[in-house]
Image (cartoon, rainbow, N blue to C red):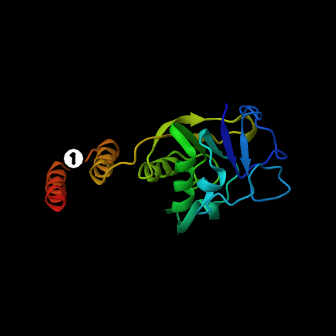
Amino acid sequence: MDNVLLLFHGRKHRIIKEINYKTSKFLDPDPNSGSDYQFSADDKYLANLINKRFDHIVLVASPLTLQLSGIVLDNDELTFDGELNNQLYLNIRSLLKNDGFMYNQSPFLVGDYDKLNTELYVDKLYSYGFIYESMFKFGVHGDNPYVKLKKVAIPTKTEKYQYMIDKLDSILFVKIKYYSYVYDEYVTKKNC
């Protein structure tokens, strides 16, 4: 991969063979990491500080506390949910070129790869204008695959609603045609 920004990773960390180190940049706040940029990835002015756009952004070892601004635990099921760190994902979006790709493991994982928690992450990132492309394995990171997401236009409220209807249709086989009609009518009246 060329023209990559690696977040939470420096040149002194473990080498990732899929990345071209000659054309890539590294962001890690640790001054001993050998990174090109020593800022926090959720710095409000990060896009201005870096002033470059990338084809790929990889969150290599991102702390859970930086990815999530709020966590909801369910101890009975050993799963959790939460709110994504808005500033972090807006920064990633602004640093990516149009049709660029973001790679990350779901911050909702507990232990090994879990399809439902990965889907939760993908669903939440849809609101930020990222759609699921595929799963991707970096050779250095063992069995847990990364989610590869493509940057697209930020969806409208109606598109977000349709996304959730389609999700319900595919998961629960629920049809919500009436509610869709009522919602569309409400949105039309509100916007006029």
Q: Quadrant of residue 89?
A: bottom right
- Residue depicted at x 73% and y 46%: 26
Q: Position of residue 143 (x, y in %)?
A: 68, 39
Task: Give the quadrant of the C terminus.
Answer: bottom left
Viewer-nearest residue: 187 or 39: 39
121 left or right of 179 in image? right
Res 80 seen here: no
Viewer-nearest residue: 95 or 119: 95
Res 127 seen here: yes
Type of amino acid under label 1: Lys
Q: According to the image, label 1 marks what residue?
A: 175
Q: How many marks?
A: 1
156 left or right of 114 in image? left
Task: Give the quadrant of the N terminus.
Answer: top right
Q: Residues within 10 Å of mark 1 (few under 14, many from 20)?
A: few
For mark 1, give the secondary structure: loop
With respect to residue 155, does 19 lie above or below? above
Q: Quadrant of residue 170?
A: top left
- Residue depicted at x 43% and y 41%: 152
Q: Position of residue 124 (x, y in %)?
A: 45, 53
Q: Position of residue 23 (x, y in %)?
A: 72, 34
With respect to residue 17, does 47 lie above or below? below
Viewer-nearest residue: 90 or 63: 90
Q: Position of residue 52 (x, y in %)?
A: 62, 44
Viewer-nearest residue: 172 or 17: 17
- Residue depicted at x 40% and y 44%: 153
182 left or right of 72 in image? left
147 left or right of 125 in image? right
